[in-house]
Image: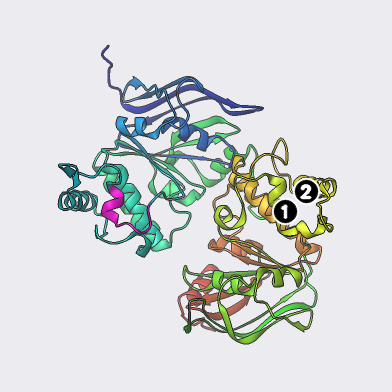
Amino acid sequence: MSTQKTDYILEVENVTKTFPGVVALNDVTFRVKRGEIHGICGENGAGKSTLMKILSGVHPHGSYSGTVKYDGEEIIFKTESIHQAISKGIAIVYQELALVPFMTAGENIFLGREPRIGGAINWNKMYSNAGKILSKYKLNIKTTERIVDLPVGKQQMVEIAKALSEDAKLLILDEPTSALTELEVDQLMEILQILKNHGVTCIYISHKMDEFFRITDSLTVMRDGGVVETRPTKDYTNDIIVSQMVGREMKERFPANTRKPGNTVFEVKNLCVSHPENVNDEILTDISFSIRKGEIFGMAGLMGAGRTELVTTIFGEYGTITSGEIILDGKKLEITSAKDAMRNGISLVPEDRKRQGLILAQSIKQNISLPNIDKFASFLSINSNAEHVECVKYSKSLKIKTPSIYVPADSLSGGNQQKVVISKWLMSNPKVLIMDDPTRGIDVGAKYEIYKLMNQLAEEGVAIIMISSELEEVLGMSDRVMVMCEGRCSGILDIKDATQEKIMKLATGLQISA
């Protein structure tokens, strides 16, 4: 049966997808024009991931109702397999890259599809073909470079090249800039424009509003499993997008607070730290700062400035302290492990919740109680009732959206996963709570809830160290800001004196003029 091509490469009509007790997608309808960059935004849990899994063949035909047309023809993926979607010309690049680290870029691009002669891999042809793809789309990578030796931005380019090597006509990018530097974001934007010029259609998913206005032609906003609206991006504003995403106006991105920081509770004095694998490589030099009880102390700096290395060292999980002091409540601490830090009242919400903060296959309850299991342990047993009661308490107080604390953590949205990570460290009753990029990869609504929680904790007397790569967040949430540059503290600003320009000058090693 012949099909007539339309102006749209993708047409999603009345798609509904349910899981036990949950409607993930509810009558979703939208269309994507050929050769455009089409943005999709929405809060975590809005249905974006489920929709992408339908488009990429993870959820097969029959597991949902409605129709999906690609290139004018209804697509029917009968089994759970992304290979069917790829064969049609639909490819997806996930936020968590799926590359083999110790293989080269060329090997990864053609992994499982290597050109062969008589059963043996034709290495010359494979690298030649990989080079042609990289050159065509101006991806500045050597085919012989190992993935492990590439920065995250270039690893992402390899993923894109891998998709394009299979003649993808529709490329889906899921949170592509969540771990990129500003320079790498700029490079990605240039690449997307090149792809568009070559006729590749892109679906672009992000939580960063400015990226939609920078690169997309049209935008679909989703909320609670449905489509709110699709319109040209130029017809949107930040306020319209946010209000459609959350179903209410959010004129203030950051909640008001009544914090009144008290006396100094935590100090770092002249701290010098060497690399964990090379004691001669000093990664942090002469860092000093203090934090007051009930204060949110922001840390800013460019990628590689040493912020994460500093807080993970304070938590006993990274470098070797060669000199300097860490002082809590006037007492000098000796911290050589996370257990030492926790015993002294220091907790860390890590930068990467999925790799460092959660055991995704385990339940919410198991994740929350794991670092606190001593609280429920007797000589030969665990008090399961007490564990349950305590975990339910934190689940409710942080408003984790879940039918039960016994569901696995990987079933939750990003914002709710982050709340689980925060819950387990709050259960340890910290005096100092370190939060490394606490709102990375989560939507505006979930961000606001975490901001309110941080204010509440600070008002209860917890000293909070907050690392953030978003300057608006640093300025909106901090009482003071320490800026780092190349492993050193380049300045500490009171929030009333801090501006984006001053922070960037300090972050790049420039002096602030009086």
Quarter where residue 342 is shown? bottom right
Tag 2: amino acid: Cys
Write the residue at 26% across / 14% down: 2
Residue 356 magenta: no
Residue 10 visible in the picture: yes
Mark 1 highlights which residue?
A: 423
Category of crowding for the residue at label 1, using alpha-carbon neighbours closer than 10 angstroms: few (below 14), some (14–19), many (at least 20): many
Write the residue at 15% across / 49% down: 125
Write the residue at 62% across / 52% down: 358
Q: Image height check: is 42 above or below 477? A: above
Q: Are marks 2 and 1 in contact (CB under 8 Å)?
A: yes
Coordinates of residue 266 in the picture (x, y in percent): 73, 77
Mark 2 highlights which residue?
A: 391
Coordinates of residue 156 in the picture (x, y in percent): 37, 53
Write the residue at 28% across / 16% down: 3
Coordinates of residue 325 in the picture (x, y in percent): 67, 85
- Closer to us: 446 or 323: 323
Quarter where residue 295 is shown? bottom right
Coordinates of residue 219 in the picture (x, y in percent): 45, 38
| Residue most extreme to the top | 1
Q: Quadrant of the N terminus?
A: top left
Q: Which residues are magenta?
A: 100-109
Q: Image height check: is 162 above or below 22? A: below
Residue 104 magenta: yes
- Closer to us: 290 or 117: 117
